[in-house]
Structures are given as structure tokens and as C-alpha cells.
Image (cartoon, rainbow, N blue to C red):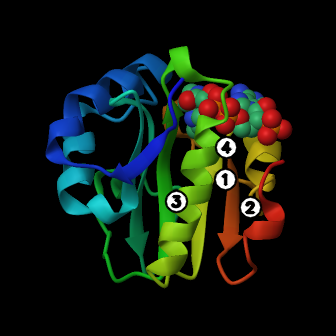
Amino acid sequence: MSKATIRQVTARDLDRCCEIEFLSFSSAEAASREKIAKRISTYPEGFTVLETNGEIAGFINAGATHEVQLSDEAFKDLEGHDPTGAHVVIMSVVVHPDFRGLGLSASLMIDFIERMRTLGKEDIYLICQQELVAMYAKYGFVDLGPSASSHGGKCWHEMVLALQTGVAQNQPE
Ligand SMILES: CC(C)(COP(=O)(O)OP(=O)(O)OC[C@H]1O[C@@H](n2cnc3c(N)ncnc32)[C@H](O)[C@@H]1OP(=O)(O)O)[C@@H](O)C(=O)NCCC(=O)NCCS
């Protein structure tokens, strides 16, 4: 596999991002094409894609806010999003099934954390299932416990990464 490159999303990436999202999440969990299109057009600074051989293999998308409410489903449609908000909320971290286990989500996450720090953001929030708590902890995310969110009919944990603590010592080996 050639070296991965990570860049900000563009409108041309919509089809491939939808393909990866729909392959990776259940229909109850996946963001719709309309939601993904809105995330691309509204907050491209918080939407990065990783390419190998000129093809997108995975992506991260997020919104920003002054007030974090992780169980708020409307935020997934960027209602309440404000690009000047100090707090970043990740909505999807996803890698195409053919490209998993290669460290690509780690590359995406490390790059994303640095981008958000450069933008001057205070912290990054996300929700994840229990099985991924340890994965996000490697980047310095702290488990805040069970979430009130029942997105997709599942149980979630809330996690936060303070961007002032320095990610370097938290990177995976
Ligand atoms: C979760 C996901 C993004 C991981 O992507 P990936 O590129 O395969 O992950 P990486 O190869 O970068 O692995 C990074 C680390 O996470 C660990 N990891 C990856 N997937 C994991 C899983 N499902 N459960 C537990 N740990 C996992 C890896 O073992 C690796 O640990 P290491 O650094 O000690 O080797 C990918 O499996 C995916 O897209 N899943 C479907 C969508 C999803 O559930 N996204 C998360 C929403 S919160």
C-alpha cells in the first residue's frame, strides 16, 4: 500500500464517503447522504479524508459547539454547530472494511487531533461503544462513562480529549 495522505474533504468526495459510511454502520446508525453532504458543505475544516493510491479509505467528521450535549441527535445534522465553538464533537471515525487493521484510523485520529489543536480548539468529544474505549484512550481520550445517547438503539460511552495536554505522549506505538 502506498503512503497514506490526509486532507480536508471536498464536495467531490461525497459518493465515496457515503459508500464507506453505509458499509460500516447499520442503517440505524449510519448518517444519511444528506447529513454527510451537509457536514461537507458546512464544516469541511472538521472533515478529513485519508487516501491511499488516490482512493479514499477512511474519514473523520465532526462539528464544533460552545455547549456540548452528546446525546443531542440534532447535532448530527449540525443543528447547534458553530465553527467558532471551542469544543469539537466527532460524529464518525470510519475506515473501509478492505483497509482495516492497517493503522489508518490511528493516522486519521492523530492528524485530526493536531488540526483541531492548530484551530485553537479546547477539546474533542465523542461517543463510542465499550469495545472502542481502549482504542480512543490510546490518543488520550478519557472515558466519562455511559452516555444518555441511545443512537442506533445502542449503549454508548462519552469520551473527551483535552487538547492542552499534548498528544505526543499518547500516540499508539
Ligand atoms: C473502528 C475502526 C475505525 C478502526 O479502524 P482501523 O483503521 O482498522 O484501526 P487501526 O488499524 O488504526 O487500529 C488502531 C488501534 O485500534 C485498535 N482497534 C481497531 N479496531 C478495533 C475494534 N473494533 N475494537 C477494539 N480495538 C480496535 C487496533 O487494535 C489498534 O490498536 P494498536 O494501536 O494497539 O494496534 C474501523 O474498524 C471501523 O471503521 N469500524 C466501523 C465504524 C466504527 O465503528 N467506527 C467507530 C465509531 S465510534
| Residue 130 visible in rendering | no
Q: Image check: 106 left or right of 5?
A: right
In primary-sequence order, the first of circles 1 and 4 is 1
- The nearer-to-camera label among 2 and 4 is 2
Q: Do the residues labelled 3 and 4 touch (CB within 8 Å)?
A: no
Please give the residue where the numbered disc 3 appears in the rendered image.
112
Q: Image check: 34 left or right of 100?
A: left
Please give the residue where the numbered disc 2 appears in the rendered image.
141
Pinpoint residue 49: horizontal percent, then vertical percent: 39, 44
> Circle 1: is it few (<14), some (14-19), or many (20+) Cα within 10 Å?
some
Residue 156 has which mark? Answer: 4
Q: Do the residues labelled 3 and 1 touch (CB within 8 Å)?
A: no
Quarter for ligand 1?
top right
Cα separation, mark 2 vs mark 1, equals 15 Å
Residue 35 vertical placement versus 117 (above, below): above
Q: Are marks 1 and 4 in contact (CB under 8 Å)?
A: yes
In primary-sequence order, the first of circles 2 and 4 is 2
